Image (cartoon, helix red, strand yellow):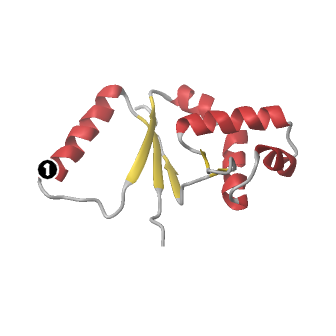
Amino acid sequence: MKDKRDLKIGIKSDKEFFDELKELAGRIDNGWLPEKPVERLYFDDLPSLLKHLTPKRFELLAELRRMGHTSINALAKHLHRQYRNVFDDVKSMERLGLVEKDKSGQFYVPWDEIDATFKLAA
């Protein structure tokens, strides 16, 4: 059985990110190991997150997860969207690590769970 892969998406400044990294490194140095790895994708601010993770891209991500390994052309047809727009969205999400390509060139969503959270400013 393959290990489940989870992704945490959020908003953190560089300082907050490195503080979290130091805290986790300290816990690991003291013998703590997570039950399962959780990979992270952080953005500097909400506008950056929303620029990269649009509603259309979330829809695409959900459908690609449901469909499994598939081509951009098949995904575009399934979503009733233009190939070029789906191509651009898939490539953008591939650069972010949200989508991966298998050895045969098919795209898929490697995540079992994506947890996206952000705090509202006080």
Residue 34 relative to residue 121: left or right? left
Label 1: how many residues lie within 10 Å, few (<14), some (14-19) or many (20+)? few
> Would residue 54 be visible to someone looking at this image?
no
Q: Quadrant of residue 14?
A: top left
* In the image, residue 64 above or below residue 35: above
Q: Residue furthest front?
A: 104
Instruction: Count all numbered tags in the image, as a single digit.
Output: 1
Residue under the point 75% across and 35% down: 87
Q: Residue furthest left?
A: 30
User: Residue 58: x, y in percent?
Assistant: 66, 45
Q: Quadrant of the C terminus?
A: top left
Residue under the point 72% across and 46% down: 60
Residue 42 relative to residue 20: left or right? right
Residue under the point 20% across and 45% down: 25
Secondary structure under the numbered disc 1 in the rendered image: helix
Residue 5 relative to residue 104: left or right? left
Q: Amino acid at mark 1?
A: Asp
User: Residue 65: x, y in percent?
Assistant: 66, 56
> Would residue 30 be visible to someone looking at this image?
yes
User: Residue 86: x, y in percent?
Assistant: 77, 38
User: Residue 29: x, y in percent?
Assistant: 13, 50
Considering depth in this image, is 114 or 75 the residue closer to the camera? 75
Residue under the point 66% across and 35% down: 91
Residue tagged by mark 1?
Answer: 29
Considering depth in this image, is 103 or 86 the residue closer to the camera? 103
